[in-house]
Image (cartoon, grey):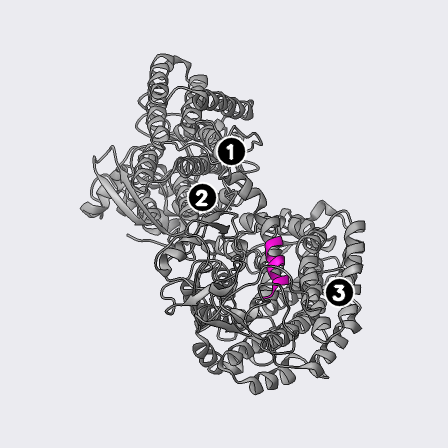
Amino acid sequence: MTADRHGHLMSDTGAEALASYEQALDDLLFFRPGVAEAAQAVLAAAPRSVMGQTLAAYLGVLGTEEKDAAAARDSFARFRSGLDTAGVTPRERMHLAAATAWLDGDMHGAGRILGDLTIVYPRDALALFAGHQHDFLTGDAARLRDRVGGALDAWDEDDPHHGPLLGMYAFGLEESGHYERAEEVGLTALARHPGDVWGIHSVVHTYEMRGRFTDGIRFLDARTDEWSQGSLLTVHNWWHYALYTLETGDTARVLEIYDAALHHDGSPGVAMQLLDAAALLWRLNLAQDDQSARWARLADAWENRDDGPHYAFNDAHAVMAYVGSGRVAQAQRLVQDRERWVAAEPRGSNRAMTAEIGLPVCRALIAYGQHDTAGPPICCCPSATGCTGSAAATPNGTPFSGPSSRQPSVPAAASWPGPCSANVSNCAPSARTTGRPRPGWRSSSATRYALRPPANAPPHSVSPGDAGGRTRAYRAGPADAHARSWGRRPGEACTRSGVRALGGAEACPFARLAVKSVMDTSRSCGRAAIGAVTALLLLVLTAVAGPTAAAESHPPPAADPAAIRDWNVIATDTISANLGPTRPSGQVVIWHGFVSAAVYNAVVGIQRTYAPYKWRARGPSTASPEAAAVTAAHRVLLTYFPASQAPLDAAYADSLAKIPDGRAKRQGVAFGERAADHLIELREDDGRFAPVEFTAVPAPGVWRPTPPAHLPFIDPWLATLRPLLLTSPAQFRPGGPPALSSARYAQDVNEVKTMGAKTGSARTAQQTETALFFGGNLAVQFQSAFRDHTARHHLDIADTARMFAAGNASATDAVVTAWDAKLHYGFWRPITAVQLADTDGNPATEADPQWQPLLVTPPHPDYLSGHTTVAGAVIRTLTGILGTTHIDLNVPSEITGTTRHYAEAGQFNEDMINARVWAGIHFRTADVVGCRAGTRIGVWALAHYFSPLRPAGRHAMPPAQQLCPHGSAS
């Protein structure tokens, strides 16, 4: 069985097919037209290649072409019907499932499978690319950022595919509103591969979103040879160039670009290019620039395609072309066809996108084409006296003359007897925005206006708020006060695009793209002021934010997060008292994971900010989260440590006494009991204390009990414990340790021998202090750091519960993962390896029978390091929760009696890795590989659990740099 360049096994794929596959993958990442030919060459050489067939299936759907998808579906079905799955690898099985789901119309199911695939196999470039394009097609901004960002830590920077991955990550950052960071990452990608057209595209977006049109033109002009011809993204990047040019007012140049690049007699008529053409003409249309002849030719091209209901985004742009060309009846026929299809089709991602977003968009476009602009008018004027060509309708609903005619002047909002529709934009002059715009805002114009309420609105009237469904009261005062009342930061602005994107639309990711296709086509706030589209936006807001608004209409009572920190201290003391002075580190982590998960469910089940852990129950919104939290913690601890009943009961009574008596308290206690009981039930028969034994016979490289106590393998049952989050203990089991004959092994032995010796080492005093600092129980150190961080940063009770639960649950599974590898590989410890180096068969090592490590060696094998695996998981989880690598942790040590401040995640992991080497108890390979495995666990944790249920929750943003250092730092 062959393997690709990243070590992934490929069934039924010979050397010739593998070479073509690698070429196809390279062409795909760089958007080269040769990808189709290379993919065909794979199947010509190896027709039964699973990855070759999967690649062909992905190519069939990524272009959003109905006929291509149908052909790919038939071909893939024939392949699968004759496939013998016995020799198919687990990775290939996941690809088969993802491709099948996508071809069958379940785009979101395919996205979830690809997400799991890239967590398990983060160096699978095809899965990352297909997943990234899936997120683009479904408009899922958060996953555009997080899917690739979460995998970058597994890639070496000198890998030839690392550059295009950075380009993808840059686009995800941009779509999530992190414009400066996106530009930085995109330029880094281009420094490595100037021909990375997706990286170019990503940087182009950052300039557009910040209104830096001149910079954008200069950027593209400097790279004309790289993007202007010869790639699958050529037309789209020309479209972006045309948008910049449009903002400069050079319409003649815009039309020149349109005719030469976007749509002409030689255009292939593919959907991706036709929708670019439609979007550009629509902008001109809204600018009152009559392009009837071009509209007619474009409408002909859409009509010639004769598309069925395949992708709602394409439908919206086809309707745009029909409306622009005056063929409203044709647009209506398309809508009627989709309505019949929606009524008959019971399932599928496009069915939901069409029903919930596509059809409302199409109906709004048709209403606009029919001049049906009834509804509350929108005022978005660049002057205080009135709008010329800006408002959709006069106060009595009188429509303007039509899509290709100059709109009449209408009064400013202040002179209207009724208020403007404030949902989209009410604007007044403001200075240019400085700093990073809030994620979700479209900042694509040099002319910016600060959002204001209608002039005739009462001081505290309520108007629709942001996409999260919140209502905001208008406040009197300067523009920044109004900005805050609309959920914006001071200085942020609406733009000539005029609309805030629906960034919180997790329930229907297509919403963001759908609204963008209609509203971001406007070249000014005023020209986006269409009553029909206002009604559309209200529809989308209702569909997307309805449940959130309902949830927020009954806010839970305020709660003190100190209750969680107090019971974390109680849990730490209880666990320590019951486990005894040795306190096996693995067990400490496990019990904290159980308690934190129950407390988390008790809190979020009431507050409904985050998804509960493996539970669907919801508590009364009037219940006390404090009472629920302390009850859950008490009940779980009492169940597992009944010998501590007296102190636990006393602490519980003291905690309840601090909560006012009444209905909220009673409800909280009851729900906390339910949360605890659910966790306890989940953990029944999970493998705790199972009779697992380490049976390997001592031999070179094989672990055996170590001095001074020569204790047996402690808690081997942890290797088979059912994880809290992962699917199995071996889910992230890495490859084995270095061979005894390898140079890597010799380097590991000689480093630990020199740096980790108890006496005569090459360590500095600071390095010795670092080794001692992390020589105690890491779980206890993390609990203290969590308590300090949540208190200093004033996290509320839900965010506090989430940090403890996510951190401790990922740490629990890190212990299970490390112990699985320890039991599976059983690799000897440095003390054994150094003393018996004359038996390893490696001429680069030399035995020292008297060698001793700085710290006493724990009684379990070397590979993987439990400490670094736990650290990697916890630190990756924290960076995801915090949205930054700046973790700001104060970590104490019971060994040294000191506290260290860690500002950056990478520094913590680097110190942890070095500490275990300098302590003489682990080889560096076991430390680094453990850290990487832990990082993958952290990514998995936040991809599947602890996710926000509404925009009020904290969202994850994965870091874009390595969190686990490479090589020696000594």
Q: In the image, is residue 532 part of the stretch drawn in magenta?
A: yes
Q: Which residues are magenta?
A: 530-539
Does residue 589 appear left or right of residue 121 in this picture?
Answer: left
Relative to 710, residue 110 above or below: below
* Residue assigned mark 2: 934
Earlier-in-chain disc, 3 versus 2: 3
Q: Is label 2 in a helix, a strand or a loop?
A: helix
Q: In the image, is residue 70 part of the stretch drawn in magenta?
A: no
Name the disc covering residue 68, or none: 3
> Which-is-in-front pick, marks 1 and 2?
1
**Is residue 721 shown to the viewer in this render?**
yes
Find the residue positioned furthest to the left. 765
Q: Is label 1 in a helix, a strand or a loop?
A: loop
* Residue neighbourhood size for the residue with mark 3, other residues' Cα within 10 Å, grouped as few (<14), some (14–19), many (≥20): some
Question: CB atoms at circles 1 and 3 under 8 Å apart?
Answer: no
Name the disc covering residue 962, or none: none
Relative to 325, residue 436 above or below: above
